[in-house]
Image (cartoon, helix red, strand yellow):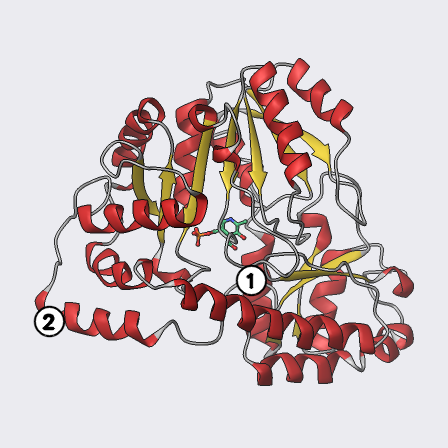
Amino acid sequence: MRELSTRTANFTDSVIRRMTRIANRYGAVNLSQGFPDFDPPVEITDRLAEIAGKGPHQYALTWGARNFREALAKKQEHFSGMKVDPDTEIVVTCGSTEAMMAAMMSVTNPGDKVVIFSPFYENYGADTILSGAEPIYVPLVPPSFTFDAKQLETAFKEGAKALVLCNPSNPCGKVFTLEEMQTIAELAIKYDAYVITDEVYEHIIYEPYKHVYMATLPGMRERTIICNSLSKTYSITGWRLGYVIASPAIIDRVKKVHDFLTVGAAAPLMEAAVTGLCFDDGYYQGLQAHYTHMRDLFVGGLKNLGFTITEPQGAYYVLMDVSEFGVKDDVAFCEWMAEHVGVAAVPGSSFFREDVHHLVRFHFAKKDETLKEALGRLAFLKEKAKAAEYVSWK
Ligand SMILES: Cc1ncc(COP(=O)(O)O)c(C=O)c1O
């Protein structure tokens, strides 16, 4: 048989999704792949039940059902102040995963360079490979996970055509400050580059941090491509509803890429999710309060157990330092922890370009009882890890 594609030959399976399979194998509390174990808002699921009987069940318009795009445009204007034309400036996609892929393919030619901050969300590396682009990684330096503006400028000088901005960030929980956003914007304008934003955690932010919309900064509306989704905001990760918002010239191209990638998002799910897009401010305040509670419970719990962690400013992840156990192979350590401690995390190395093996990532979008169970098990981590001999992670 002839060789399969060289482009995808070095793909490994996603470490995050692999950890979910390992968690299932050992019956571990799964704090690896980021999805809630609580239900979506009942108004949305009730509406889905209604739609099951009466439809729509056939293809929606390729770039998304009209009422869904109108509701999205209103919501975007409400939170960011941006006026968005639902016909020419929005494409509804199958999750922000497709939104990011369609954005990359619309912007880059094979060989073009794309700036990605490290640590990064796992998919960006694969997205650049699939679109033939080459990533230039710029480190976000702990503990504040800030970047060096000179290093960023060097990446633009190397000819970067786009920058991917995950804000709030998975995995480090960073919320970019206005000043940092302005620095990125100034460089993007100076070097005529696009900024592709991943804003899926836009509404999961902890006081006193605030979400700044890159597209609203002076000169950025026409060069920002917003990728976002309903997965995290309405706890419907399985519905695969995402979207791209950008200028008409960019959206015209994204529409075509999206059409050939997936044709369209699921019609009945769009119809039901309109209910969520029309929620008033109280919903988003409740969401923030709920996540603040989960963060306090879990991150506070880790600190009480004596672990060193990075404080999340947004999103629902926490990085924990495991260097005290002499971890050299964090992938093997996470597998061991799932089996012997009963809690699954993601090895930090899957998010960093740099040689980082001393961090693991937990997510805390879980019911109180799940988080308490995890903390109860993690109470034995220090003891078990220190006693462990002949393990492959040391
Ligand atoms: C930063 C980030 N972007 C995108 C996604 C995927 O989002 P979606 O479910 O909309 O494809 C995730 C999921 O964990 C994420 O953390």
Crowding at mark 1 (Cα within 10 Å: few <14, some 14-19, many 20+): many
Crowding at mark 2 (Cα within 10 Å: few <14, some 14-19, many 20+): few
Identify residue for label 1.
33
Residue under the point 72% across and 57% down: 331
Residue under the point 50% across and 57% down: 203
Across and down, in percent, residue 353 comes to 72, 38
Q: Quadrant of the C terminus?
A: bottom right
Mark identifier at residue 53: 2
Q: Quadrant of the N terminus?
A: top left
Residue under the point 24% across and 63% down: 272
Asked if disc 1 is less than 8 Å from ligand 1, the answer is yes
Across and down, in percent, residue 84 comes to 32, 37
Classify 258 as above or below 285: above
Residue type highlighted by circle 2: Gly
Q: Secondary structure at mark 1?
A: loop
Classify 303 as above or below 86: below
Asked if disc 2 is less than 8 Å from ligand 1, the answer is no
Q: Secondary structure at mark 2?
A: helix
The quarter holding residue 270 reads: bottom left
The numbered mark, 2 or 1, whose residue comes first in the sequence reads 1
Extreme residue toward the left, this view: 54
Q: Is residue 357 left or right of residue 66?
A: right
Q: Is residue 218 left or right of residue 300?
A: left
Q: Is residue 186 left or right of residue 4?
A: right
Q: Is residue 156 left or right of residue 393?
A: left
